Image: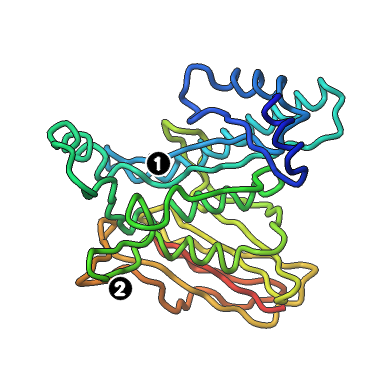
Amino acid sequence: METAKALRGLDPTLELVVCGSSHSNMPTYPQWEATVLEETYDQVDHISLHMYFENYEKNSNEFLALPQKLDNYIGTVSGIIDYVKAKKRSKRKVTISFDEWNVWYHERKADAERMRTWDWPEAPVLLEDQYNFEDVLQVGCILNTFIRRADVVKIACIAQLVNVIAPIMTEPGGAAWRQTIYWPFLFASKHGRGTAMQLAVEVPSYDADAAAGVPWLDIAGVRDDDAGTLTFFAINRSGTETMEVDLALDGFNAKTVEHTLIKHADLEARNSKANPDNVAPQKGSGAKLEGKGVRLTLQPHSYSMIRVGL
């Protein structure tokens, strides 16, 4: 706390982040969040959280349920923030900095084995996960969670950007290509700006080990008044069922609709130097204006961005 005071004395415009739990499976979670916030609440702006996503068992339903665990994680820490704020009778609003997240497991065990046998090599290849199409769905769901929780998650940083568990890959000599997860990250960054909307969603759900009541449809929406658009990011978690979805847009005057689709028949499909566009967005045909809303047809295991012009 004294360090925070010293930093603010140097620059009162600084935003300070206090360290929360590295993940929600830690034995000290969530008591640590309560303890550290009770000590620092009036001196910090954010509390940091981390979460990485893995699918060693190759169970897609379980893997794609993990963002529900993420949502519960954020909800719990948000409740702790409110509790400490009320306990201190504070007018200050502390928010969440989710400053490490991504899918991370493809090369993790192999990297651990290599590190045990290496003799201090210079700049070795390390943590360079090769992402697949299934990871597009996962990253899309993660980003949707952050959008839906934008009232409390004010910072959300993907762990790294180039080579190391990253959306962009390079090689010595200049070759570079976009990994599969580049696309949902790009779309959320470019079009997920404006005001996050609270969507009332009615869809079937399933129970998983990670969480109960996981909706088969994961969707988030953003209104951009400057651009005159509504943008929806939708992931069909089901690998077998096409989903018909009605977006009710009462109160909006929808004039146009565009559908961008990311879909591949193989969940393990990857991009590479030789085939950089194996998994890439394409113009979709699954969205049409209907009445006062939009009718969506979402293919099994697919990522869709729907842009509605107002």
Of the residues shown, which amino acid type is indicated by label 1? Phe
Quadrant position of the C terminus in the picture:
bottom right
Task: Using the image as rendered, state which of residue 1 and residue 235 is in the foreground.
Answer: 1
Residue 72 in picture, x, y percent from top left: 57, 34
**CA gap, disc 1 to disc 2?**
24 Å
- Would you name the residue on which mark 2 appears? 277
Disc 2 marks which amino acid?
Answer: Asp
Q: Secondary structure at mark 1?
A: strand
- Measured as percent of width and height from the top left, residue 84 is found at 75, 24
Q: Residue at x 24, y 44 (%)?
A: 107
Residue at image coords 45%, 79%? 283
Identify the residue under disc 1: 53
* Label 2 crowd (10 A; few <14 / some 14-19 / many >=20): some
Mark carried by residue 45: none
Secondary element under disc 2, as helix, strand or loop, is loop
Residue 116 x %, y % = 16, 31
Left or right of 70 in this view: 125: left
84, above or below 236, in the image = above
Label pair 1/2, CB-CB below 8 angstroms = no
Q: Quadrant of the N terminus?
A: top right
Q: Is residue 246 above or below residue 209?
A: below
Label 1 crowd bin: few (<14), some (14–19), many (20+), radius 10 Å: some
Q: Is residue 243 above or below residue 36?
A: below
Query: 143 and 164: which one is in front?
Result: 164
Q: Residue at x 60, y 18 (%)?
A: 31
Question: Residue at (53%, 68%) from the top-left corner?
Answer: 305
Most extreme residue toward the bottom is 255
Q: Is residue 60 left or right of residue 6?
A: left
The front one of 63 and 272 is: 272
